[in-house]
Structures are given as C-alpha cells and as structure tokens.
Image (cartoon, rainbow, N blue to C red):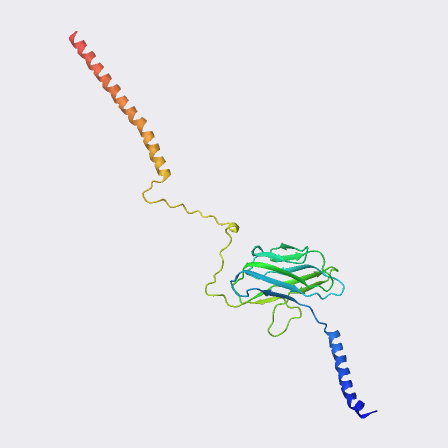
Amino acid sequence: MPPNHAARAPGRVVASGAAALTAVLTLAHPASAHAEVEAGTARALAENVRLTFVSEAESDSAGFTRIRVVLPDGIAPGDIRLTEAPKGWKLKTAADGYTVAGPALKTGVDALHRIKVRQLPDAEQLVFKTVETYSDGEIARWIELPNCSVEPEQPAPVLELNVAGAEAAPGSPDPSSSDTVDTTPAATPAGARPAAKAAATQDDGASTGPLVGSVVVALLVLSGGAWWLSRRRASSDVG
C-alpha cells in the first residue's frame, strides 16, 4: 500500500465510526417535532397581542387535521380571535381553550395559526398545552410543564413575558358579560322635588279638598236648622 494511502486509512476508519455512531443515535432517539408559540409583543398586560402557534409535522404518512390549545390562566376563550389558519380551518372555543381544525394538511406540512388576544395577563410566563391530531388518528400531546431539573420529552409551548410597563393596567371586564345590576337609586338634583313626593302632595291636596267642603256644608245645614227652630219657637210664644 502506498504511504499516502496508509496515512489516510486511520482517518477513514474514524469517519466511518463517527457516521455509524450518529446513525445509531438517530435511530435510538429520533428527532422530535415541537409545538411553539411566539408573540408580537411579549410583555405582561400588553393589549391586542398576536400570538403565532406552529406545530411541526412529524408524521411520514399523514397531515394535521386538528390543533387543540389549552389557554393559561388570565386568558379567557372570549378574549381571543382567530386571525390566520390553514385554508378551510375554523376556530371553536371551549371552556378551557379552543380548537382550530379543518381539511387535512399535506404530509410534512407544519400547521401554523395566529390568534389575537385582547390582553395578556400579568405573569412571567404563559404555558399553552397543545394536542395535535393527524389524519390517520395519531395524536401528539405537547402538554408537559417546564422542569428545572429534568427536560420534558414533550414540552408544552411556553411564552416568556417581559415585565409590564408602568402605564399598563388590567383591562376592565366586558360590560356585556357582566351579570351585576346596579340597584343604587339615582341621585335627585338639589332643589328639585322628587316626582313621587310631588305626586303624593298632589294626592293629599286632592283628598283634603272634598273633606273641607263637606264640613262647611254640614255647618251651614246646622246653622240653618238652628235658625228655623228659633223662629218656630218665637211664633209659638206669640200665639
């Protein structure tokens, strides 16, 4: 064997060994897809924020048909609106989150959708547990919570938030969704007589008038009777 060939032989053996090891590791631990979330404004209490969700395709034989997202505390299903999704996909809300679903995507195509959130909560991070469904019935659950000691195998999408600005404040609830009814009586302007009191005064005056008239008539009748009786007695004495 020529000297240059002998010199290159150990390098070939090392390269072949590295390639074989890489292949073994790849088969033992296949690259896993992820579900991710990003925000246009990743700040606590930010308003009208667009969130982008991406589910990476990992099936070799089927495409996505459904993405289910569990909303974190502080974001209600009524606070979101779908702004972008695969063609034909629709949003349906639930008590704890929402689902976007529609015709199956092509095999290997990632599922991307965007929502608009009325206001982000005052928190350091938001966790969006995600469940993906493929057209062949396969389900991938990205629902494991972050752990400092052990990295989860199927972590849920996490959105890290910056501290809220000094001028930021929690938004007021939607008046249309409130069941509270204000029962406090309306204030009466100074110097004005309440309508109910005025009506009562008028009723008192109306009911008092007839009573006074009746008393006057009775007194006149009695006076007339007394005068007639006195004249009759005087006539009897003369006779």
Image-quadrant location for residue 160:
bottom right
Residue ID at (78%, 90%): 7
Q: Position of residue 216 (x, y in %)?
A: 26, 24
Residue ID at (36%, 40%): 194
Image-quadrant location for residue 86:
bottom right
Image-quadrant location for residue 233:
top left
| Above/below status of 220 relative to 98 | above
Q: Position of residue 229 (x, y in %)?
A: 22, 14
Of residues 185 and 48, the one drawn nearer to the viewer in this rendering: 48
Number of numbered callouts drawn: 0
Q: Position of residue 13 (x, y in %)?
A: 78, 85
Q: Quadrant of the N terminus?
A: bottom right
Of residues 218 and 203, the one drawn nearer to the viewer in this rendering: 203
- Specify the farthest residue to the right: 1
Residue ID at (33%, 33%): 204
Q: Is 159 on the left-hand or right-hand side of 188?
A: right
Residue ID at (37%, 38%): 195
Q: Position of residue 191 (x, y in %)?
A: 31, 43
Q: Quadrant of the C terminus?
A: top left
- Specify the farthest residue to the top: 239
| Above/below status of 211 relative to 228 | below
| Above/below status of 193 relative to 23 | above
Q: Is 183 on the left-hand or right-hand side of 191?
A: right
- Specify the farthest residue to the left: 238
Of residues 110 and 216, the one drawn nearer to the viewer in this rendering: 110
